[in-house]
Amino acid sequence: MASVGTHIKRLRAAKRMTQEELAEQLHVTRQTVSAWETGKALPDVEMLERIAAALDADVTEVIYGAKSAPDLAALKREWTQRGIGWGLWLAILYYVLFCCGVWGSWTRGLSYQFSNKDYRVMEEALPGSWSIDVNPREVYNGAEPVIYKDDTGCRITVSNINWDEESGTWKIWFRAEGVRHFYNPWRGVLVTGCGGENHESGYYRTDKFANLTVAIDGESHTADLIGGGIYDRNGLYFGYVLFPGTTGHPAELPEQMTLTLTGLLRLSARFDRR
């Protein structure tokens, strides 16, 4: 209560009221108001209510200097409720990101989906065949012609031709690029020539692969599959033995050949935790 006088003086000054004017409203003398403000006297409870009314303030503001004493219990309840709410949202976010495959799909793409037990991989053999005329020497030097492309964004390119000294053969490699949409991280699709050793999960295992026919100067043969594997987050490579070589020099590669892939596989991944 020792600070009541200070609060009266502050509230009176805020109202631009003199001690005489306040005293007149309260029907007391100016000296009484001065005694309150200097702490030499204290108003009783009834007078506190009259002072508060004259100064357009709450009684608690006259006594404590604030309109109301803080309700610590209410504040504690409010912050507890906020904490529970934020905790619930964080738990939901954690579950969606880390327990439903979203984070793994965003960061690791199809390589995560096709090798995770929580994803079901469905296999579909595409009817028809896809052909392309290529210059093997250009591919050897870095050209990557497209042999397959669809409206989902999947495509297959002729990625590389290289000489294998150990087997004395030329080999050709294809790169299959799949799609995992940002807006639907629970699904992914890849069109490829083979499944690849790393593309096996609890729901998917296959020994099927696409046949490659190589035609050179009117003569054709079926190439032997080498195999394949994941090369990055959204793709897979697969290769075939092209034909025997002698020196490994690109000059012994023909200037033109026709490649035909038959029996491509469409692999569709879908989150399906059981």
Image (spheres, rainbow, N blue to C red):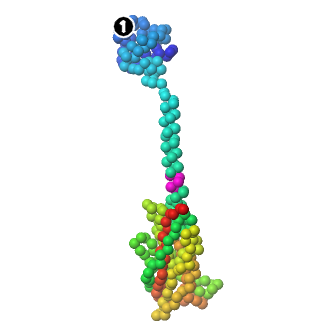
Q: Is residue 40 visible?
A: yes
Q: Is residue 170 left or right of residue 41?
A: right
The foreground one among 32 and 185 is 185
The location of residue 209, given as percent across then percent down, is: 53, 80
Label 1 amino acid?
Answer: His
Q: Residue at x 46, y 14 (%)?
A: 5
The location of residue 149, given as percent across then percent down, is: 43, 75
Instruction: Provide the residue span drawn in magenta.
Output: 93-97
The location of residue 118, given as percent across then percent down, is: 55, 63
Q: Quadrant of residue 35?
A: top left
Q: Is residue 19 magenta?
A: no
The location of residue 89, given as percent across then percent down, is: 49, 48
**Is residue 27 positioned above or below 172 on the image?**
above
Q: Quadrant of the C terminus?
A: bottom right
Outermost residue on the front side: it is 274
Question: Magenta segment, principal secondary structure?
Answer: helix
Label 1: which residue?
27
